[in-house]
Image (spheres, rainbow, N blue to C red):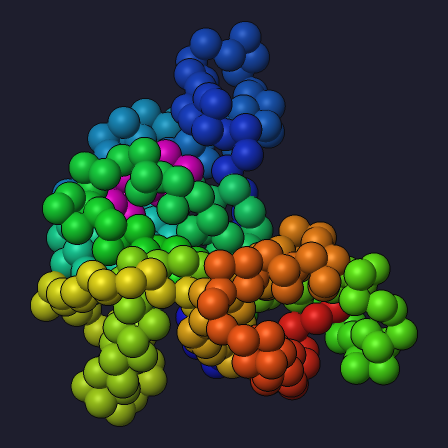
Amino acid sequence: MDADQTRMKMKPLSSIRENPCPSVANSPSPQPKLADLQRAIAGTLFRPLTQDEGMQRAGAAVAEEFIKPNDRLTAFERLQIYNQQYWWRLLGAFGEDFRGLRAVLGERRFERLATAYLEARGSTSWNLSDLGQHLVPFLEAHPEFTRPRSALALDVARVEWARVIAFDAAEKPVLTAKQIARTPADRLRLGLQPYLVLLELAHPVDDFMRTLKRTAIAAVSNAVAATHTRSRKIVTVRRSRTPIYLAVHRVNFSVYYKRLDPEAYRLLLALRDGTTLEDACGLAFAESKERPEQSAARLQEWFARWMEFGWFCR
C-alpha cells in the first residue's frame, strides 16, 4: 500500500453473517420489516460469486421477491450488479494490500485464497484497510491454500500487513531528547509508536518487496494501469541462512523497511513490553561478547537514528 493510495469505506457485515438470507415467505406479515428486507438483500450480496463471476442462483428468490425488472434487465440481473460490485471491490482492495502474496502464490491460487478468506472473515469494518487483519492467523490455520510455500507466504503476509499498520496507524507525540534525559535509565520506560512493527523473518521479504515495486513501476508508466496489472509469474524467494530482524515504519507518510541487529531488535521488543531502558539494554546484550565500549557506541548510534525517525513516545 503506497503513500498515494486512496481508500473507499464500506459497511461491515456485522450480524448479517449469522442469518445471511432469511426466508421472506415465512414472514407473518405481507409487508416485511425493513430489517428483514436489508438482511435478505445483503445476505445475497455477500455471497461469493460463481466461477464465471456471476451471482449464485440462491439469490434468485430474493431478487424476484424484492427487485423490479425493467425493459433491459431481469430482477436477478439487477441484483447481480450489486453482488458483483461488492465482491470485485473487496477482492481488488485485498489484492492491492497483498501484491507480494499474489506474486508468491500465483494468480489462480491467490484468488482461491482471497475468496476463501473473505468468505470466512469478510469485511467487519467500515475501513477497507482492515480487510487483512486476520489473514496471518487464517494462513496459519489453513496451510492448504499456500502449500508448499507456506513459510514464505506467512512471511510475506506478515510484512504486507505490517505495511498497512505502518501506513494507517496513529502517531503519538514524539519524545524529545531533553524529555528522555530527565529520567534515569533505571526508571525510564519508553513507548514505541503504534505504527512501528517489529518482525522476525526467515526470508528477505523486504528486498523482495522493493524488487516487486520497482518491477511494477518499470512495467507500466500509467499509475492506474499499474494498479490493475495482473501478475502471472510466480516469484521465488530463497530462505535466509540466519533470521532477519525488520522494523516496518513510516516517515512523512511513506512506508520504509529497516533491518535491525539482533541486539537492537531485542532492545526494542523489551521497550515495547514496558521494560526500563536499563533492563532492556541488559536483555539486549545479555549474550554479547563485545566490549562494553563497543556496545555503548552501537547504542548511541541506534538511539540517534531512532530519535530521528521519531519512534519513541510516552
Residue occupying image coordinates x 50% and y 30%: 16
Q: Write down the quadrant of residue 36 in the picture.
A: top right
Q: Nearer the viewer, residue 39 or 76?
A: 39
Secondary structure mostly seen in the magenta stretch = helix
The percent coordinates of residue 9 (x first, y second) are 54, 58
Magenta region includes residue 119: yes
Q: Position of residue 213 (x, y in %)?
A: 30, 79
Residue at x 65% of width, y 73% of height: 311
Tell me where residue 226 appears, x and y as whole percent: 27, 79
Res. 84 visible in picture: no
Q: Quadrant of the C terminus?
A: bottom right
Query: What residue appears at the point 57 percent right and 51 percent down from the top-left corner?
Result: 126
Identified at 48% across, 23% down, the residue is 18
Is 148 situated above or below 39?
A: below
Q: Is residue 136 left or right of residue 14?
A: left
Q: Write down the region rendered in magenta.
A: 113-121
